[in-house]
Amino acid sequence: MRSGIPFVRRIVVTSLVCLFAISCAGTETVQPPGEAAVFGRQGIKGELLYQGKPLKDAYVYAYRSYSTNLLGPADFASVPSASDGTYTIELVEGAYFIVARKRATGDNTGPIVAGDLYTVHSSNPVAVAGGEYAVVDLELVKMRDPMFFQSMSREETSTGIKGIIVDSEGKPVPWVFAMAYTSSDMKRVPEYTSIMTDADGKFAIFLPQGGTYWLAARKNIRERPVVGEPYGLYKGSPDASVVVTSGRFVEGVKITLESYRKGIQD
């Protein structure tokens, strides 16, 4: 009887050791940065860059809707990008609006402030099909003026500008911004912007008061336009300006996007 007790104890101890070993082995399967999670079979993947070099420890976010202007909590997020800038997000089938951010604090949540890196995918939304990965490579830029984002998330007012953004063929352009400047100097971050246009290309810019505003439209979020970027100036007046009366909206404004070339603002 006494000789049987150590044997039983050995069985129990051995079982506990095995369970502990299995548990420890399981922790080694945690998804490393930039690699696909074992539970997914489709999603998006790609490379993140900043100033042409791979960007480490940035996050990519996927939104099911642009109703929050892609500024609130995302539906899905990647782990930090790897040292070579690669990332992966596992997603169910559907269409997603993709954003990449790297905050100076290192956090993966919170507001974007001057100095943080940010970009919105220019070809949103991205379709994810079953068993496939859509490749989305993104170049991030530094936020120099937080007003650009604050203006897009402000409350509605009774004063502003409404219209439509179209391409050179007159077709509505979705996922772009209309922008209003308070001076004719439009080679800078605008004071006011619309949220991203929807499928019908319509926009609304809400303003705090009446006055003269200079209008433009863009597809990418950068400090200054680059050659070839879809860009447009309001052509309803010689200098792209429109006069807004307090408490009223100027409606029917149309802005046509064309390929940006040097001197288009001059």
Image (cartoon, rainbow, N blue to C red):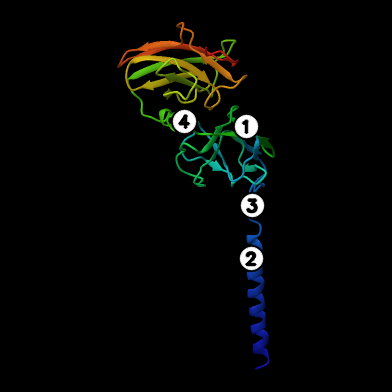
Q: Are marks 1 and 2 in contact (CB under 8 Å)?
A: no
Q: Which residue is mark 1?
A: 127
**Considering the numbered disc 4 on the image, is that residue within a helix, a strand or a loop?**
loop
Residue 143 drawn at (x, y percent)? 50, 34
Indicate which disc, 1 or 2, sits on the residue closer to the N terminus: 2
Q: Label 1 neighbourhood size at 10 Å, few (<14), some (14-19), many (20+)? A: some
> Is residue 231 placed above or below 107 in the rendered structure?
above
> Is residue 84 placed above or below 184 in the rendered structure?
below
Q: Which residue is mark 4?
A: 67
Cα distance between the residues tagged 4 and 1:
18 Å
User: Which numbered dot is residue 200?
Assistant: none
Residue at point 42% right, 19% down?
181
Q: Which residue is mark 2?
A: 24
Q: Label 3 neighbourhood size at 10 Å, few (<14), some (14-19), many (20+)? A: few
Residue at point 61% right, 19% down?
227
Indicate which disc, 2 or 4, sits on the residue closer to the N terminus: 2
**Considering the numbered disc 3 on the image, is that residue within a helix, a strand or a loop?**
loop
Task: Please tell me in which quadrant of the rendered image residue 213 appears.
Answer: top left
Q: Quadrant of the N terminus?
A: bottom right
Q: The disc labelled 2 sits on which kind of residue?
A: Cys
| Residue sitting at the far left | 247
